Amino acid sequence: SLPSTVTLRIIMKSIATISCVYLATAALLMQSTSAWVFSKKDLQKAASAATCAAVVSLVATPFHANARDFSGSYNDPNHPNCIRKIENIGKIATIYGTDGNPGCPANGKGTDFDLLASVVGDEIQIDFGPKGGPKAVMGKWDETGEPGITFPDGNKWTLKDQK
């Protein structure tokens, strides 16, 4: 099984942070007698550390300021008790789920699947191809009644737990 996007995000952020700490440490100004002395190389290292800090902030925040965070667990009325879990970072989302026939037992066990999706604003485009469905289904965030994702066929995944 692939690591979750949350796990990947933590790993990416940790690597970037460790790199920044290393660069910042290397860029510390060297004290010589009573004056601070720094070379062009030291300034370049400091600039690299600042650039690295900017990268960490990009990894830690969504890439699209207006992109909705769809992260959370959902109820799917077409597949009762089955798992629908979205992990969203910026414009990319992964969906882990289970399917039954048509529903799942109370514990959510069923046939596992992992899907990829892209997010733009309040819309999420999901590739259901890996489980035999269409490759580009557009869902839209819907606050009507219980908040959730409404699909073109009228199905609505309602938000159970938001991350």
Image (cartoon, rainbow, N blue to C red):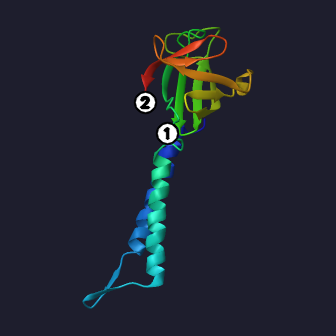
Which residue extends farthest left? 34
* SS for dot 2: loop
The residue located at (44%, 79%) in the rendering is: 42
The local crowd at label 1, few if under 14, some if 14 to 19, many if 20 or more residues have their Cα within 10 Å, is some
Which residue is pictured at 44% across the width and 59% down the height?
53
Residue under label 2: 163
Q: Would you place residue 3 above or below residue 39 in this image?
A: above
Q: Where, by quadrant of the figure, is residue 4 drawn?
A: top right
Q: In this view of the protein, which residue sits in the foreground, 15 or 31? A: 31
- Residue 66, position as x, y percentages in the image: 51, 36
CA distance separating discs 1 and 2: 10 Å
CB atoms of marks 1 and 2 within 8 Å: yes
Image x and y of residue 14, in percent? 45, 53
Identify the residue position indicated by label 1 in the image. 6
Crowdedness near tag 2: few (<14), some (14–19) or many (≥20) residues, C-alpha within 10 Å: few
Q: Is residue 36 above or below residue 154?
A: below
Residue at image coords 65%, 24%: 138
Amino acid beneath label 1: Val
Amino acid, disc 2: Lys
Compared to residue 150, the image places residue 17 above or below, namely below
Instruction: Return the mark for residue 98.
Output: none
Q: What x and y, as percent, mark residue 84?
A: 55, 21
Please, is residue 162 above or below residue 21 in the view? Answer: above
Residue at 48% across, 13% down? 144
